[in-house]
Image (cartoon, rainbow, N blue to C red):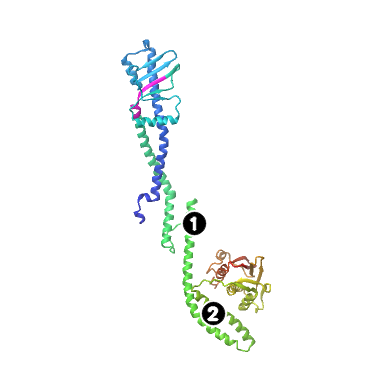
Amino acid sequence: MPEHYRPFTSSLRSRLLILTFLFMMVMSVFVYVPSIATYRQDFLEKRMENAQIAALALEEAPNNAVSPALERELLNTAGVIAVIMRREDKSLFLGFDVMPEEVDATFDMRNASLGTLIMDAFEAMEMRGKRVIRVVGMPMVQGTRWLEVTIDETELYDALANYSNNVLALSIIISLFTGILVYLALHWLMVRPMRRVKDSIVAFRRQPEAVRKGARKSLRKDEIGLVERELARMQDEVRQSLNQKNHLAALGEAVAKINHDLRNILSTAQLASDALQQVDHPGVQKVSRRLMTAVSRAVALCESTIRHGKAGEPEPEKSWAELKPIVDDVALLLGLNEEEHFNFEVDIPDGMTVLADPEQLHRVLLNLCRNAREVQAGDGYIGIKAVTDPDKTTHITVADKGPGIPDHVLPSLFKAFNSARAGGTGLGLATARDIVLAHGGQISLVETGPEGTSFMVCLPGEED
């Protein structure tokens, strides 16, 4: 369902407003329950106070008695039906003639607990003023040992009902007012930024490669600001990754087409190399061997790419292979041993073997050595050293004395199209990394600087 057709209660801001109102009403109930009990207690104590004052008028009257008219006036003023007050030496009565023979309930207000007062208040609300009750309370006048009044509960019920209605109306007003204020505050602090996050996610899902116009960086320092900034950073990284994958897919399709034609061209070059082998000349023989090896590897790479139908690396065909012949072949292809002022050192024990695909390992070392050679103009140095751990893990180090890798390249050193030198494609280290990871190993930059750079390739000595 489109967003503008959603019910009101389905949005976050509407739910927030409703929940705020409900919570405030619940809090009002917790306040109302003890307050109505207190209100009933105050009502009854006020009536008992008035009744006690009315009864004191009997002490000044002859024989502690007043006329029926004055008695009715005193009782009406006190708001009670009858009063019984016992002093130390005498008892005073008002309304004795009109006192009912039976009352519906008796309440002792002298030591009533809050729970009892609450239950009595709700019982009075339930009876709706249809009872006559007797109330015993604490006397206010010294020398009084007993105070009892009889009351018609109608006025008490009316007062409690009116109080409840007022509390309910006030609670609704306060809840609405507080709910609106809380809603506006939370809407500004939370709902608005969450809607921005939601809109950003929806827009990114619809067009992940499009850059949103007008997007601004969040300046908030709280958790929501952190979420907004991390979301924007994640979207940028995913967008770059998608663009790069699309670029690689297009490049892979082009490479697959080129490979098909290139294989035919290399086959012709391979035939020409075979013919050169027949020439009886030392220089030609030496060059032709190098040419034959290079052309054969190029043909095998093209066939492998076409066979797998993608530009990625095929699964390595591991076997125990001698490492030193692979390194010697790399030096032969790059001509490292033939340059007079270039120092190429190999520190690999004779007969050392590694568990790897020889062709793919050859490509890894070739990429590392080619990069090291191309960054060193004229005189230079490349050293390859290999050691084996007791667990048969082989560590191969390729070091040079070049100018080092720039700092801005280091964070994405092994990513495709991230070349540190002019004219480079940036695929050499990315390819080497993919091959090593496919072998279950690791490749890492050990150190780099003005004194040179060294990489380490670690290959496990056991099958996964």
Task: Tell me the SS state at disc 1.
Answer: helix
Q: Position of residue 212 (x, y in %)?
A: 43, 61
**Based on the displayed image, in which of its 4 quarters is residue 42 positioned?**
top left
Q: Position of residue 71 (x, y in %)?
A: 33, 16
Query: Quick one: label 2, few (<14), some, or many (20+) residues within 10 Å?
Result: many
Q: Quadrant of the N terminus?
A: bottom left
* Residue occupying image coordinates x 46% and y 25%: 111
* Residue occupying image coordinates x 63% and y 84%: 286
Q: Amino acid at mark 1?
A: Glu
**Based on the displayed image, in which of its 4 quarters is residue 79 positioned?**
top left
Distance (Cα) linking label 2 and label 1: 47 Å
The residue range painted magenta reads 147-157
Near-viewer residue (315 or 236): 315
Left or right: residue 345 compared with residue 33: right
Q: Position of residue 4 (x, y in %)?
A: 35, 54
Please tell me how many numbered marks the rendered image carries: 2
Residue 371 appearing in the image: no
Outermost residue on the front side: it is 102
Left or right: residue 458 compared with residue 144: right
Left or right: residue 114 compared with residue 359: left
Q: Is residue 246 magenta?
A: no
In the image, residue 261 sits, relative to residue 236, either above or below, namely below
Q: Decide: marks 2, 1 in contact (CB < 8 A)?
A: no
Residue that carries the numbered disc 1 in the rendered image: 230
Q: Position of residue 34 (x, y in %)?
A: 42, 33
For marks 2 and 1, the one nearer the N-term is 1
In the image, residue 452 sits, relative to residue 226, either above or below, namely below
> Which of pointers 2 and 1 indicates the residue nearer the eye?
2
Q: Amino acid at mark 2?
A: Val
Outermost residue on the top side: it is 62
Residue that carries the numbered disc 2 in the rendered image: 299
